[in-house]
Amino acid sequence: MSRTKTSKAWMREHVTDAWVRKAKSDGYRSRAAFKLMQIDERDRILRAGAWVVDLGAAPGGWSQVAADRVGPTGRVVAVDLLEMAPLPGVRFVRGDFGDDGVLAQMESLLEGRRVDLVLSDMAPNLSGIAGVDQARGAYLAELALDFARTHLSSNGVMVVKVFHGEGFDALMREIRAGFRKVAVRKPEASRGRSSETYVVARDPVQNDAPEPSEREV
Ligand code: SAM
């Protein structure tokens, strides 16, 4: 299929997608907001007062849901490569999450505290080369896992987007080694034909890494 035909098909699916329409009418910035709501409905991950990190946050659907649920006593720190229009209750850092400088800015907004919930909906820009896209997706999930291992509180939770395909099993083994309870979810709002799934991981196996505030940044 020509590129134009493919993008037309994508556009048609996108604008007629019921979740896209619902996001618009309910005031959410993305259909993704419903994925987080559906995960939360089942797994009860968001609570008032929680400190949350939202990786790959733009345009902001997950951050909207998170800020609403944690309320004024909680905190949401969001990061994305792309600019994100301000949202009440969300502190935003623009940049590549893999950069040390970006990590340092996030840690400063977290005031050296551990967090209750790490969310990652990060996805790479698609090159169209399946192997490359798969490897990039796995790398982003690894970055999120590394962050969760060193920044989650002892009863913290991580929700990370992972893509089925090469590297999936290895990533799952790593997640299972780092957390005592691991579940794989495919929320209804996630397109059936997409290879994305979300891993909900609880009860991190404690590591000896010092609190972020004790580390040199
Ligand atoms: N959860 C978002 C929402 O509810 O609106 C949608 C996230 S979108 C599917 C994936 C995001 O990951 C993109 O905005 C992209 O810029 C971001 N991303 C990809 N790689 C990243 C990186 N290395 N650092 C920060 N953000 C990244």
Image (cartoon, rainbow, N blue to C red):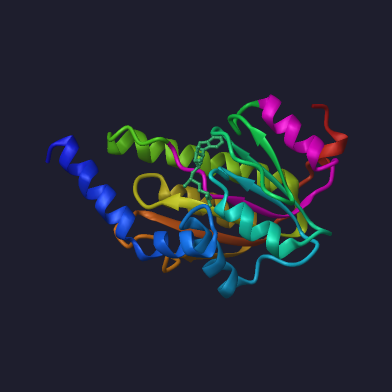
Residue 43 place in picture, x, y as percent? 60, 71
Residue 100 place in picture, x, y as percent? 68, 26
Residue 47 place in picture, x, y as percent? 73, 67
Q: Which residue lies furthest to the front in this view?
A: 25
Q: Is residue 38 left or right of residue 91?
A: left
Magenta-drawn stretch contains 104: yes
Quadrant for residue 80, please give it. top right
Q: What residue lies at 41% left-to-right and 59% top-to-bottom?
A: 20
Q: Nearer the viewer, residue 96 or 9?
A: 9
Q: What residue lies at 54% left-to-right and 34% top-to-bottom?
A: 82
Q: What residue lies at 72% left-to-right and 50% top-to-bottom?
A: 88
Quadrant for residue 137, please give it. top left
Q: What residue lies at 46% left-to-right and 42% top-to-bottom?
A: 123
Q: In this view, does 57 lie to the left or right of 90?
A: left
Whether residue 146 is visible to the viewer of this picture, yes or no, is yes
Residue 138 place in picture, x, y as percent? 46, 42
Magenta highlight range: 100-124
